[in-house]
Image: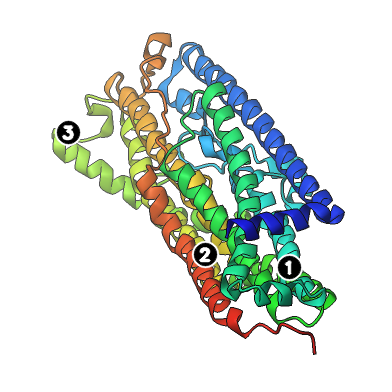
């Protein structure tokens, strides 16, 4: 086997086009890593600087009413995962910053896609993007010419006459390409890991990153084995290369886009304006407006508190009635927001489930979803951030409402100061554990593995039936 691998590597080195394409692919991988690292460094500095400034502005806002401070609000930021340098996922599309305030939920902000329209059209240059798109093209192109070229120049017949087992020969060719792709993937993974671990003081080398490394080795193997099978069955090298290009276009570009469009048509997402309008209508019907005229819910609330304290009017309550109403506003309206956001997230989950089912036609979407999940940059991670910020917002606003309620009476004014603003807890985002990441990545990861096993079995079965001489 070693001799076969050495022979195949020698043949590749003699092919100037192959060496040129290998060099270009390697250069693109290096460039993508540099670009990802620069963005990672820039955002990490920005996130720390702006987070500190937002906290400083909150603490030094001066003396004001607690509810005014609730509307003053504060910005929260999502720190990047250490593996975001490898795969930035949907971070640049979904947003990484959120402004929290009383009464409502805001959309995530700081979306890189809004500042770079080309990002939406062509995607971004990341190591994951190169390994999902460019490296498979190179591997299937190299593999598609291996067997058919040996057959056309008589090398295949000579090797088999000398007693080289045909299966050993075929697997030697496949392993040669797997070694090449594995070296490229491993080198860029190692460089990214060292940069991240040393310069950002985050742990890159963990179970998720090793799973990522294995995932891309398997994904490259899909195209290597597909190319080998094409090469065994093709009559000419030209036919094999054309077929290889067609398969790459179908598997990497057309099939994923068709499934994305199909999922959007079957489970259409709601545009932001319509979504917020529906929430507003639901609150008007079933919620409480603390800044409007007293409705039925506020009157029911009023009766409860009057009975609790045994008084006849809210003016007689030993607290500030506005604080009670403001907190009731939050507690009654929050479930309405939760209901609508859960419905929206369910649409996203249904779409993703359809994308996962595309695995029988293409391993690209499953590989992409597994990669994002392991890197901590997928939709579930973004939803986790949004839910943690919302939990923080509820606690944050509740403290202010309760201070207003308990530190003044009807018509009075509660005045907070710097000492109180500083007691507000600092938001700390808790990223999903490796086990949770794997739970999201498991199904698409196994789909890619099944592709490799099926193609490996096909290679094993077809190898003895290879034609030694062209018809």
Which-is-in-front pick, marks 3 and 1? 1
Q: CA distance from mark 2 to mark 3?
A: 69 Å
Q: Nearer the viewer, residue 266 or 37?
A: 37
Give percent across and percent down for residue 105. Answer: 49, 42
Give percent across and percent down for residue 85. Answer: 60, 37
Q: Which residue is mark 2?
A: 448
| 240 up-or-down from 197: above or below | below
Asked if labels 3 and 2 touch by Cβ distance under 8 angstroms, the answer is: no
**Marked residue nearer the N-terminal end (3 or 1):** 1
Disc marking residue 146: 1
Q: Is residue 300 left or right of residue 159?
A: left
Disc marking residue 91: none
Count of numbered labels shown in the rendering: 3
Which-is-in-front pick, marks 2 and 3? 2
Which-is-in-front pick, marks 2 and 1? 1
| 106 up-or-down from 38: above or below | below
- Residue extending furthest bottom? 471
What residue is at 73 percent from the left and 70 percent from the top?
Answer: 144
- Residue extending furthest front? 162
Asked if labels 1 and 2 touch by Cβ distance under 8 angstroms, the answer is: no
Disc marking residue 311: 3
Q: Is residue 310 left or right of residue 255?
A: left
Q: Is residue 440 left or right of residue 51?
A: left
What residue is at 53 percent from the left and 70 percent from the top?
Answer: 451
Q: Mark 3, residues whose alpha carbon is within 10 Å: few (<14), some, or many (≥20)?
A: some
Tell me which corner region of the image, top left, top right, bottom left or bottom right, holds residue 471: bottom right
């Amino acid at each position: 086997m070693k001799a076969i691998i050495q022979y195949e590597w020698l043949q590749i080195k003699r092919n100037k086009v192959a060496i040129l394409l290998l060099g270009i692919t390697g250069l693109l991988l290096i460039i993508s890593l540099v670009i990802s690292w620069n963005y990672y460094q820039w955002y990490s500095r920005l996130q720390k600087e702006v987070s500190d400034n937002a906290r400083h502005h909150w603490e030094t806002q001066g003396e004001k009413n607690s509810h005014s401070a609730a509307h003053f609000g504060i910005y929260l930021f999502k720190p990047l995962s250490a593996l975001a340098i490898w795969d930035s996922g949907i971070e640049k599309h979904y947003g990484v910053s959120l402004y929290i305030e009383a009464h409502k939920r805001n959309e995530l902000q700081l979306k890189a896609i809004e500042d770079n329209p080309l990002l939406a059209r062509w995607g971004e240059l990341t190591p994951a993007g190169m390994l999902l798109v460019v490296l498979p093209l190179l591997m299937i192109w190299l593999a598609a010419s291996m067997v058919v070229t040996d057959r056309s120049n008589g090398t295949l017949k000579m090797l088999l006459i000398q007693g080289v087992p045909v299966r050993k020969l075929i697997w030697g060719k496949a392993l040669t390409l797997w070694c090449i792709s594995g070296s490229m993937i491993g080198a860029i993974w190692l460089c990214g890991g060292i940069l991240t671990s040393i310069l950002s003081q985050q742990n890159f080398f963990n179970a998720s990153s090793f799973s990522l490394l294995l995932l891309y080795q398997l994904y490259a193997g899909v195209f290597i084995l597909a190319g080998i099978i094409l090469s065994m069955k093709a009559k000419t090298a030209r036919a094999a290369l054309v077929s290889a290009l067609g398969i790459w276009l179908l598997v990497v570009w057309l099939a994923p886009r068709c499934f994305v469009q199909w999922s959007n048509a079957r489970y259409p997402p709601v545009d932001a304006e319509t979504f917020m309008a529906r929430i507003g209508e639901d609150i008007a019907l079933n919620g409480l407006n603390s800044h409007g005229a007293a409705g039925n819910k506020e009157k029911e609330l009023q009766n409860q508190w009057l009975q609790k304290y045994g008084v006849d009017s809210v003016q007689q309550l030993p607290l500030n009635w506005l604080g009670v109403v403001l907190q009731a506003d939050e507690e009654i309206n929050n479930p309405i927001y939760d209901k609508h956001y859960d419905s929206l997230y369910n649409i996203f989950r249904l779409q993703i489930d359809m994308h996962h089912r595309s695995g029988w036609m293409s391993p690209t979407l499953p590989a992409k979803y597994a990669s994002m999940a392991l890197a901590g940059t997928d939709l579930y991670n973004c939803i986790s951030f949004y839910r943690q910020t919302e939990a923080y917002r509820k606690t944050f606003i509740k403290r202010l409402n309760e201070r207003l309620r308990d530190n003044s009476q009807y018509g009075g004014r509660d005045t907070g100061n710097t000492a109180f603003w500083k007691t507000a807890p600092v938001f700390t985002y808790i990223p999903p554990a490796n086990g949770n990441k794997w739970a999201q990545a498991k199904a698409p990861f196994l789909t890619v593995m099944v592709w490799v096993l099926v193609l490996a079995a096909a290679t094993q079965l077809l190898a003895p039936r290879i034609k030694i001489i062209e018809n």
